[in-house]
Image (cartoon, rainbow, N blue to C red):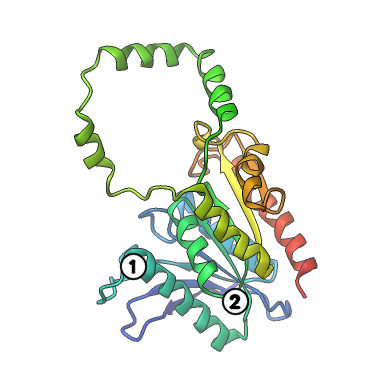
Amino acid sequence: MREQVLQLRADRGLLGILTPAPDNSHANLGCILMNAGVIHRIGPHRLNVKLARHLAAAGLQTVRLDLSGLGDSRPESTARSFTAQAIADIRTTMDHLERSTGTSRFVISGLCSGAAVGFKAALADPRVVALQLLDPYAYRTSHASWRYYVDRVRLPEAWVLAFQNMVRKQPPQDEINGMLEDFVTDPPAEEFARGLAQLVERGVFVMCLYTGSVQQWFNYRAQFDEVMAPYGIGGRIRVELMPDSTHTFLDIAAQQKLISTTDQWLASVRRQLP
């Protein structure tokens, strides 16, 4: 397996690493993996490297992409928002793979902020046929809150932390809002559901996978359908839980389970693609 450096923009400032599928794979399917937050294209704990090489061996032309302004990619000299530029970067990468390898159908996989960007890119480009969202938007239900706090009260350290928060001086609310304003906030559930419905109606296969790091907001599989059922897509999205994994898939066992789960999902996707 010989990986290739891709310089994708006219100014050669958008950089990705192509992990090619074997010459005999004959699979018209590519995959794009992108940054999680500000982490370099290798992904947290080299997760993207491991995924890319595994997926390429399974027949997918796979690119680990540094979005503009992240990793080794230079910022684009435009007035676009970060999200709009990220979507343009992903589409540029698909254009390159289509020209150079003939690949015209794509899987996008993203973690955290990468999931948010991947979701919007899938909505923008019909060449996306499958979408894997790792720790994407989550909408807490009363049952999820109950499960979370019941589990917490069993932990001695939770009681210590609660006491410390009671006696520690807290910053004013306007200061808290100021600290949070630069972070991406989840859109209303209806907006996320509407986008998912568009993808499902277009025939896109979607997987949402949640780790134990977001259990305060999402902690049981049926929660997704309970939130999405009023919008007509309950039961139409594949949902996976990895409660023993951290957000960044720190443990080797968690990485292996993610790769295995991705394998099973993509095998199902490929069987159903026309």
Residue at the (31%, 17%) spot, across then down: 165
Using the image as rendered, state which of residue 91 and residue 11 is in the foreground. 91
Q: For residue 61, say whether it is visible.
A: yes
Disc 1 from disc 2: Cα separation: 26 Å
Q: Quadrant of residue 9?
A: bottom left
Mark 2, residue position: 127
Circle 2 sits in a helix, a strand or a loop, which is it? loop
Residue farthest along the front direction in this orientation: 230
Circle 1 sits in a helix, a strand or a loop, which is it? loop
Q: For residue 221, say whether it is visible.
A: no
**Quarter of the rendering occupied by the N terminus:** bottom right
Residue at the (49%, 68%) spot, across then down: 121
Using the image as rendered, state which of residue 136 and residue 190 is in the foreground. 190
Q: Is residue 13 left or right of residue 88?
A: left
Does label 1 or label 2 sit earlier along the sequence?
1
Mark 1, residue position: 72
Classify mark 1: residues with Cα within 10 Å, few (<14), some (14-19) or many (20+).
Answer: some
Q: Quadrant of residue 173?
A: top left
